[in-house]
Image (spheres, helix red, strand yellow):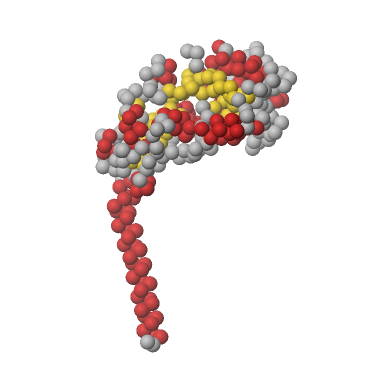
Amino acid sequence: MNKKLLLTIQISTLSLVVLLTILFNSLFYILFTSKCESNFGSTPLEAKIINVDEYLPFDENSKIYKLESNTKISGDLPILDGASALLPVYSAVAHAIYPKESVIYDGEKYTNESSIRFTDTKYAYKGIVDGDVDIIICAGPSADQKSYAANNNVELVYVPIGLEAFVFINHVDNPVSNLTVQQIKDIYTGKIISWHQVGGPFRLINPLTRPEASGSQATFRRFLGKDNEIKKNPIQSFGSSIGFSFRFYVEDLVGNSKVKAISVNGVEPTKENIRNKTYPISVEFYAVYRKDNENPNIQKVIDFLLSEEGQKIIDETGYVKINE
């Protein structure tokens, strides 16, 4: 075979491969991707990092609720940390009862000398077990976080200090605005895979989850129940999504106009419905500390959180009082 003919065959083969690839991708777009894009988006909640600068204690421009309390703590100050969504709470607590000079922020992060740290749920639970922080403000722990404490022979004390709604969210253009508890569980366990099955359009549901160490994922696991396994067909990733988080995070911290919190069992996740316990997925959040920590100021902080002033901070921040 001469070289000219061989080159012609090679070019023709390459052209055919390119053409088939284009045809396959076009067909895949028409059959799947375009169906996800047409009426409502496929991702209901974009990740957002909390801007610490907006929630600093002792800053006149801070968004925290500024309560000037007569209760003041001095001496061995408990180091505070917690979940990202609860930063406005423990920052406001420090503003109310800690000395100003105890909070040290270098313009990017809290320093190791500061009485406040800002990590997230995963590292807050690790920090409390390791003894790096004294009190964390978080949702309940995951199974792995409980195991980490047990494996290190650390007993943690969980003090409920507030209530919050655990919410499920989808795109604002999605016509489905209410699901039952059982429907949500069926979606995440693979029994329901299309929005059509819950009164919506003929479109796959893409059930999103969060990192296992996050407070929202741990709360979701408890909601789903230990006997239910998360199941998702890979093709559902091309559908329109449902996700979950905490009400305050969705409405106040993220403020994404493209998503909405759906009602559950016909009840909307409002503060009033959390208070009167009609919303079916209300959860507690906690002040957590090591039982063997002998710092006497820990109890003083806990007492403040449960006091009228501390509960006012929780309520004014956007959460719900525990002792309503």
Q: Nearer the viewer, residue 59 or 92?
A: 92
Choose top left, top right, bottom left or bottom right for residue 259.
top left
Q: Position of residue 12 (x, y in %)?
A: 35, 75
Q: Position of residue 40 (x, y in %)?
A: 33, 41
Choose top left, top right, bottom left or bottom right for residue 67.
top right
Q: Position of residue 227 (x, y in %)?
A: 40, 33
Whether 138 is drawn above or below 6: the answer is above
Q: Nearer the viewer, residue 236 or 22?
A: 236
- Residue shown at the point (39%, 81%) measured from the top left: 7
- Residue shown at the point (30%, 57%) measured from the top left: 27
- Residue positioned most to the right: 75
**Number of marks in the image?**
0
- Residue shown at the point (36%, 24%) measured from the top left: 268
- Residue 68 visible in rendering: no
Whether 216 is drawn above or below 271: the answer is below
Q: Nearer the viewer, residue 177 or 196?
A: 196
Choose top left, top right, bottom left or bottom right for residue 109.
top right
Horizontal side of residue 177 vs 113, given as left or right: left
Q: Position of residue 105 (x, y in %)?
A: 67, 32
- Residue shown at the point (65%, 26%) measured from the top left: 134
- Residue positioned most to the bottom: 2
Q: Nearer the viewer, residue 89 or 156?
A: 156
Quarter of the image with the N terminus is bottom left
- Residue 246 visible in rendering: yes
